Structures are given as structure tokens and as C-alpha cells.
Amino acid sequence: MLYVSKYLNSLKMKQKQNNSASKCPFLNGTLNQKTTEAKTDLSSDNSKTECPYTQDIEKTATIIDPLNFDWIARNAIKLGIFEHRDQPVTRPKGSKTPLPDRPLDIPYPNGPMVIERREEDVPVDTMKDVRRNIILVTQLLMPNDSVNAYFEQQLKKNEDPDSPQLQKAISDIYGGWKDYGYKTTPNVESFDFDSPDRKVANRNLYTPEELKETNKFAIKNPETVLSIALFRSIMQQYLAEAIQAFKNINEPDLMSSQDIEDLEKYAGQWATNNFNRELMPALAMIYKNKGETELDQEDFAKAFGFIKDNGAFDNHVKVSKHVAGDKKARVNEFHCPAMFKLNNLLSDGTLLFQAYEVTREAVAQGHLSEHIRTIRSKVSNP
């Protein structure tokens, strides 16, 4: 397909310009430390500002079949995806949450909910370890060349993109878009896309009026919802094939059943509805502001840039004195570790627009009609 070819060509051009895709845009500056050279030593913490292992993976991936999942699995094992740290993490006093001891220890309890609801401290070092682990595992399981080739394959596969993963993604759209009310919305005029006051750090990026407009937009343009769900479903298919490659190795000396279970837990983190929940309102705003004319590739790029730049996946949480282990109040700055990979895939809008074109064509051919009805029903009856 033309759009997929454009997508891959533009990605190759970016990689030449940047020399590699190793920079993590959501890590730089997060911890107010200078960028350091990424190393493959699990006992170090040089992954604060760069993606661990990327250079090793990308150099090798260019000379092999990018869809060789057996190679991806064995390379991940070789680079230590199941290994324990040389130095164990120290548990904070009074903490009951699991701590990251190896790359696949990515416990989400080490997050804002532990601080806000359970009033347990999550030290900055632990937060960094969890984030670092997720980024590291992502780079090992999802080399850019492999993910890009897989999306090209799946989007060209056939005229009906339905799958169990797509059905699951549609079922996860619960009740449409609404103001959940547990945090304040930005202090901006609704539909002011470029307001300097739009940026938030509490993951509640939209006004109630914008969320209502999103529901109208989804009912009128359900193919847009489907295109985001299709992206999520293909990502799940990719991870399922990658994990199956680990299972096929079947060498107890290399991995345990617990290791496989942890891989599946990791994959489950990519199955959440969060991306759909954040991107659709941005697309609805663009659609409204351009006079409800047809969306194009630039619009998808603009929508992704909007949620990336304005903090849809940021969460700054106050740690009070009585919660903090050292009895000193501070702010923990949580940043979604998946965003660097999403940025690699989606920043120019080509892939999402291609998914949009595929879903529109499928609907025009009489496919996915049940999904269209499900979307409209859920959004109409939140």
C-alpha cells in the first residue's frame, strides 16, 4: 500500500538523520540529569535518559529478517531480559509493594495509586527502576524494524482486518468519553487547541465540552475509533507472536514458566484503552476546528503531537511528609514509558492514517459492521 511505503521510507529517513532511534524523548530532562551513554549493564542506571540496548538491537536487526521472532526472543534472552540485578533493590520502610529486581519486574503498583490511595511511598529510585525496566523490555521485544515490518504486513494482509484482538479493543471502549471528575481539567477555553495553558501534569487534558464533542464525533465517524483500535490490535498480535517464540524455545535453563507469565503481563499493559481515550478527543477537536472536513495524515500527526506535548501521559503526584520515607515532601514525576515507542511509530501520522484508510475501506466493503454498531451503542449510552 502506498501509505505504508511512505511510512517506512519516512522512518528510514528519520533514522538516517538521527543516526539511530535510540533517544527517548520522554526521558530527556525528566530527572534533571545530563544525558549519559546507554550501556547494557543491568546493575547500572544509565537508562535514565536513553533507551537501553537500542543500538545493539537496531544494528543487528538491520541484517536479519525483521519478522524472525525466534531471533528476537533469543536475542532478548542473550541481552538479559530474564536476569536479576547484581545489587538488589532496597525496600522502603513500611512498603508492601513488589520491587523491580530484573527487567520483567515492572509492577504498576509502584505508581501514583500507591501514593494517593494506599499512602505508601514510592521512592524516586524505585520509580526510575520501574520506568527503566519497561523501556528496556520494550526495546528488546519490539525493535523498530520488526514492528514497522509487522504493521506493513498486517495492513496489507486482506480487506477485512477483523481479529480477536480487534474485537477485544472494541469491547474495551467503555461508555465513551466523559469527564471522570476526579481531577481538575485545564483552565482553557474549550477547543483552543494551541493555548499555552493547555499543558497538564495530571492526565486530565480535556474540558467537559471537548469530551462531549468527542462522543458526537465518534458516533459520526466510528471509523476513527476503529482505526485506533486496529493499531492496538495489531500491536497485541505482534506481542502474541513474540511471546509464542519464547514458548517455542522450550529450554528450561533459559526461562521459567514465571518468565513467560511475566511476558504476558507486560503485553497486557499495551492492551489498555488509555491511548484511545486520549487521542480521540484531540482528533475531535481538530475535526471541529477545521470545519468538519475529512481527516488527513497531518491531522493524525497533529493529534498525536498534541497529547504527547501537553502531558496526556504525565502524572505528577505530591508525596506528603507523612507518606515520604524520609519525611520530606516532594513531587514524583511519573511519565508513561510507552510513549517513546509510540513516538517512533506515530509521530508523523502515517501509520494511524493508513489504519484509518484500511478501516474506511473495510467498512465500505461491508466488513466490521458489528463493530460500528458496538461503538455507536457504547458512545450513545455511556
Image: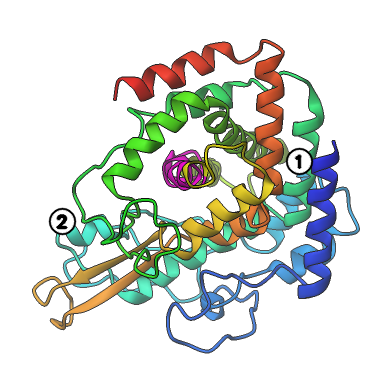
Foreground of the two, 182 or 72: 182
Which of discs 2 and 1 lies nearer the camera? The answer is: 1
- Residue 144 is situated, as x and y percent measured from the top left of the image, at 73, 56
Q: Is residue 273 magenta?
A: yes
Badge 2 or badge 1: first in the primary sequence: 2
Q: Residue at x 39, y 57 (%)?
A: 192
From the viewer's perspective, is 3 left or right of 209?
right
Q: Residue furthest left?
A: 322
Q: How many marks?
A: 2
Q: Residue at x 25, y 55 (%)?
A: 185
- Residue 140 is situated, as x and y percent measured from the top left of the image, at 66, 57
User: For the residues marked 2 and 1, what is the alpha-carbon distance in whole angstroms?
Assistant: 41 Å
Q: Looking at the magenta stretch, what is its main secondary structure?
A: helix
Disc 2 designates what residue? 118
Magenta residues (range): 270-286
- Residue 225 is situated, as x and y percent measured from the top left of the image, at 52, 31
Circle on res. 150: 1
Q: In this rendering, is residue 157 above or below 291?
A: above
Which quadrant does the C terminus fall into? top left
Q: Secondary structure at mark 2?
A: loop
